[in-house]
Amino acid sequence: MSIIALVLLLAAVVLLAVAEWPRISKRAGLQARARARRRSHLRVVETPDDDSDEFARAVERDLANLPTFDPRAKRD
């Protein structure tokens, strides 16, 4: 077997591996491990309920202050 044939065979194997990588990684469980590593440093932050009530009141106040547009109203 010549050097050129070996290089072409190796290139074909590499191309096939690159094309099938999503399927290979899913079967090997690599995506789940990578996701677990990325999420390992994350933590849930709990907020007191009074902050959420204050936020809800602020949102309601801001929504009440928004200008409204009635397309059926007559223009002056």
Image (spheres, helix red, strand yellow):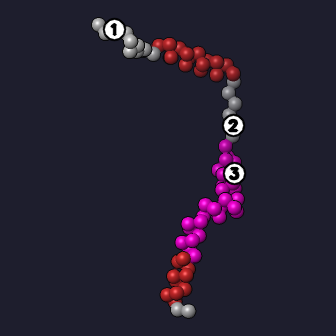
From this view, report whether residue 60 is shown above or below residue 13: above
Q: CA distance from mark 2 to mark 3?
A: 15 Å
Which portion, as a residue range, is magenta? 13-42
The secondary element bearing badge 2 is classed as loop
Image position of 50 (left or right of 58): right
Q: Residue at x 60, y 64 (%)?
A: 21
Image position of 23 (left or right of 8): right
Magenta stretch encompasses residue 24: yes
Q: Which mark is residue 44?
A: 2
Reading the chain from its start, which is encountered first: label 1 or label 2?
2
Amino acid type of the residue that numbered disc 1 sits on in the rendered structure? Lys
Residue lying farthest to the front in this orientation: 72
The main secondary structure of the magenta stretch is helix
Reading the chain from its start, which is encountered first: label 1 or label 3?
3
Q: CA distance from mark 1 to mark 3?
A: 59 Å
* Viewer-side residue, 15 vs 36: 15
* Viewer-side residue, 44 vs 23: 23
Q: Which mark is residue 74?
A: 1
Q: Nearer the viewer, mark 1 or mark 2?
A: 1
